[in-house]
Image: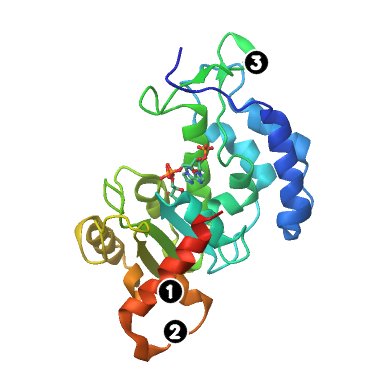
């Protein structure tokens, strides 16, 4: 019926299991959470409803039950870099991207939707955002993006893909539309943008050019202290240790490429 993939099989077990994995192993510092209640709140956001009439607010109870703070300087926003971000953030040990929070962790990589006339999940198909934007998955990430941006503080990092066909800073996009407008300026000391190309991918976008320039201009106009680094000056790789200054940019790029290559093997 719909063009999108249907609900992920075993959704309930996955959500409850991920919740326990998170609170017991990944990040016990969030404290005790009620994982069955979290599943109920998640499910009740979209079950038995028209799959095209789900709003971000429908996940409010889910957010209340899963919410925990995001440590200052740990927020990592991104576009078109999911696997690199997942590996680089290291499940919250290095950075805490939205997918490394309890609320994002339970839904990452999954698909879900209900149906108006039945209490069951639709395992056959779910609406894509082109079919209707008020679908269960889109509204989930919209709500989470807003909450994540509102609670981010200190130095904020943004990891963009310089090889993305539509530009490193897509508009529309979650970062452009739901995250930037919800950042709390008085809690943020700096915004650091990293533009990283795919290994052997085209160098389409970089700091000071095209869509990245648009982003830099927007953030500066909002009053943020913005810095931007391209991968050839070594962005994430620089975090792994000091880079000797006499070696120049190409060595740095090699450092980054081998680091990214290492990440991509996962
Ligand atoms: P894509 O299109 O590269 O990747 C979408 C995949 O990332 C889906 O598997 C989705 O899970 C998962 N995902 C993890 N975090 C988010 C998310 N936060 N989000 C949408 N999907 C997410 O990603 P997008 O659409 O460009 O979104 C990137 C955004 O995530 C950035 O704004 C970044 O700052 C933010 P699923 O359940 O859909 O299979 C917000 C929206 O963190």
Disc 1 packing (10 Å; few <14; some 14–19; many ≥20): many
Q: Quadrant of residue 133?
A: top left
Looking at the rendered image, the quarter that the C terminus falls into is bottom right
Q: Which sits earlier in the primary sequence, circle 1 or circle 2?
A: 2
Q: Which sits earlier in the primary sequence, circle 3 or circle 2?
A: 3
Distance between the Cα atoms at labels 1 and 2?
9 Å
In the picture of the structure, the residue carrying the numbered disc 3 is 120
Whether label 3 touches label 2, CB < 8 Å: no
Which of label 1 and label 2 is nearer to you? 1
In the image, 188 versus 207, the foreground residue is: 207
In the picture of the structure, the residue carrying the numbered disc 1 is 255
Is the shortest distance between ligand 1 and the CB of mark 1 under 8 Å?
Answer: no
Disc 2 packing (10 Å; few <14; some 14–19; many ≥20): some
* Position in image of residue 196 (x %, y %): 36, 62
Whether label 1 touches label 2, CB < 8 Å: yes
In the image, 154 versus 207, the foreground residue is: 207
Which of label 3 and label 1 is nearer to you? 1
Left or right position of 220 against 20: left
Q: Is residue 256 above or below residue 79?
A: below
Residue 69 visible in image: yes
Q: Secondary structure at mark 2?
A: loop
Q: Quadrant of residue 38?
A: top right
Distance between the Cα atoms at labels 3 and 2?
55 Å
Q: Is residue 114 above or below residue 147?
A: above
Q: Residue at x 57, y 42 (%)?
A: 108
Distance between the Cα atoms at labels 3 and 1?
50 Å
Q: Which sits earlier in the primary sequence, circle 3 or circle 1?
A: 3
In the picture of the structure, the residue carrying the numbered disc 2 is 243
* Position in image of residue 25 (x %, y %): 76, 55
In the image, 91 versus 147, the foreground residue is: 91
Left or right position of 20 against 197: right
């Amino acid at each position: 019926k719909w063009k999108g993939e249907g609900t992920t099989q075993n959704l309930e077990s996955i959500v409850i299991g991920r919740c326990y994995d998170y609170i017991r192993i990944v990040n016990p510092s969030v404290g005790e959470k009620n994982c069955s209640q979290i599943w109920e709140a998640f499910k009740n956001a979209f079950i038995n409803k028209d799959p095209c009439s789900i709003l971000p607010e429908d996940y409010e109870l889910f957010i209340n039950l899963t919410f925990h703070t995001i440590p200052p300087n740990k927020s990592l926003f991104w576009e078109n870099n999911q696997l690199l971000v997942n590996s680089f953030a290291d499940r919250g040990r290095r950075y805490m991207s939205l997918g490394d929070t309890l609320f994002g962790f339970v839904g990452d990589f999954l698909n879900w939707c209900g149906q108006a006339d039945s209490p069951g999940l639709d395992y056959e198909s779910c609406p894509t955002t082109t079919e209707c934007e008020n679908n269960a998955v889109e509204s989930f990430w919209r709500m989470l993006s807003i909450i994540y941006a509102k609670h981010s503080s200190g130095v904020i990092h943004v990891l963009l893909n310089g090889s993305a066909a539509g530009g490193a800073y897509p508009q529309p996009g979650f970062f452009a539309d739901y995250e930037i407008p919800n950042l709390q300026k008085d809690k943020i000391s700096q915004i650091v943008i990293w533009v990283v190309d795919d290994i052997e991918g085209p160098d389409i976008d970089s700091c000071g050019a095209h869509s990245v320039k648009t982003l830099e201009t927007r953030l500066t106009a909002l009053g943020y202290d913005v810095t931007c680094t391209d991968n050839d000056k070594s962005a994430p790789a620089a975090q792994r240790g000091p880079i000797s200054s006499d070696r120049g940019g190409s060595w740095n790029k090699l450092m980054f490429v081998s680091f990214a290559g290492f990440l991509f093997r996962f």
